[in-house]
Amino acid sequence: TLSERLGGVFDRLRGRGALTEEDVNEALREVRVALIEADVALPVARSFVKKVKERAVGREVLKSVTPGQQVVKIVHDVLVETLGGGEGDHELNLNRPAPVPILMVGLQGSGKTTSTAKIALRLQKAEKKKVLMASLDTRRPAAMEQLAVLGEQAGVKTLPIVKGQSAVQIAKRAMEAAKLQGFDVVMLDTAGRLSIDEQLMAEVQEIHRTTDPAETLLVLDALTGQDAVQTAERFKERVPVTGVVLTRLDGDGRGGAALSMREVTGAPIKFAGVGEKIDALDVFDPERMAGRILGMGDIVGLVEKAAQEIDQEKAEKAAKRMAKGEFDLDDLADQFVQMRKMGGMGAIMGMMPGMGKFKEAAEQGMGSKELARQEAIIRSMTKKERKNPKIMNASRKKRVAAGAGVQVHDVNRLLKSYQAMSTLMKKMGKGGKRGMAAQLGQ
Ligand code: GDP
Ligand code: MG
């Protein structure tokens, strides 16, 4: 992840007075590569890196954190600012006499119809608005029914379907019906295309002109990455987009597209679609997205990461060996690596409901730092010693301690906990249970 990369580059700078331009440049090369890997458009990555650089060069190196952490923090802050924007920016602007039109635009399959229903439900539930939805999609025969079905599920009214009307005619009819029936908000769901074409753009433009929406929300599929950025550019040329709805953030999109989107459209991302269900909609959270791009992750991200990064096969192999009582120090080191990937025992505890209070204790005993230390001890042993820890005598311990930069009693402590664990594993093995990593990985 980006934070790990930066950690590596900058930890060498520990103890220096200030971050020099050269130091920062080296780290920023990493930042740029990581951003591009996260699906951020090249020009956006460039201007982003420039901003970070301006802020980082000459910054005093703090004693309490590593320079790596410090730059990660700067990168994080710039990310949040870039994704964020002003206060209230992520709210819908409905400050208008009712009925207030909201226009949904985007490519086919981006999630317009689904998002229309999600937002309508949210407005109705959280803001007690009376919402009417109307499908202006005259292309696909099933499109209007799709919205009607979603409306039924969500308990949101939809405009009765009248065949043979144009999109603009339906839009006008929706506004009139809403006025007569006292609706607060009218959500207008438009037809998409597989790609941008002139006909689509002309239609969207005409609907926009006739309805003069308070919000024009561009729906973009986060999984399409750079294509979504291009789509945003095309739409922005034709209609004044006031906000973006980024869908499929529940997928493995890397989130970098979000950053580009903000730069390209200048419009804030207002909502994030996080699933197919009608309530799978989040108000866009720049902090969380920044965490996702950086790979630092929030709790959800951490769990996902844990699931991905635990090498299932390795874990199962280790579990089998454990069950047979063959668990050696190499296996233990592997377990440490897995745990460290998840942010140490403290982070793991923090993710488990009801375990929060043990978090601190776990962090001290099995935090990332401690895990790294224990790993270092194991790595300082010879292969023979790792396979057969019983041979560890006083002189071997002394040698290992020196190699790992720790005291002999640290080595003793590790060996003791290995013994305890190995005994436990054998017991668990008899019960047919799986290893620690395998269990955490489920
Ligand atoms: P439209 O053509 O733009 O109206 O797209 P639809 O709303 O019909 O959505 C296309 C497909 O994407 C449907 O199967 C939706 O259930 C699905 N979909 C929409 N939003 C999300 C989302 O946030 N996450 C996931 N996983 N699927 C979504
Ligand atoms: Mg649709």
Image: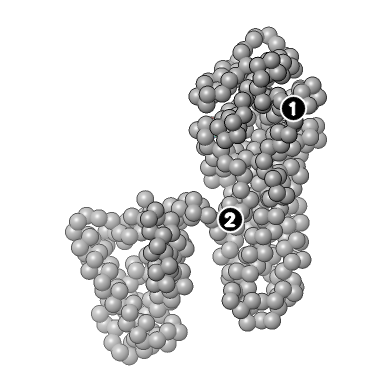
Q: How many marks?
A: 2
Residue 272 rendering spot, x and y as whole percentages = 60, 41
- On screen, residue 366 above or below 272: below
Instruction: Tell me if I can see residue 261 in this picture.
Output: no
Seen at 35% across and 85% down, the residue is 409
Which image quadrant for residue 400? bottom left
* Residue 10 relative to residue 297: left or right: right
Residue 403 higher or lower than 120, as above or below: below
Q: Which mark is residue 386?
A: none
| Res 291 label | 2
Q: Residue at (61%, 13%) from the top-left corner?
A: 160
Label 2 crowd bin: few (<14), some (14–19), many (20+), radius 10 Å: some
Q: Which structural element holds mark 2?
A: helix
Q: Is residue 405 left or right of residue 394?
A: right
Amino acid carrying label 2: it is: Gly
Please tell me which residue lies in front, 312 or 61: 61
- Identify the residue under disc 1: 97
Query: Could you tell me the amino acid type at mark 1?
Result: Pro
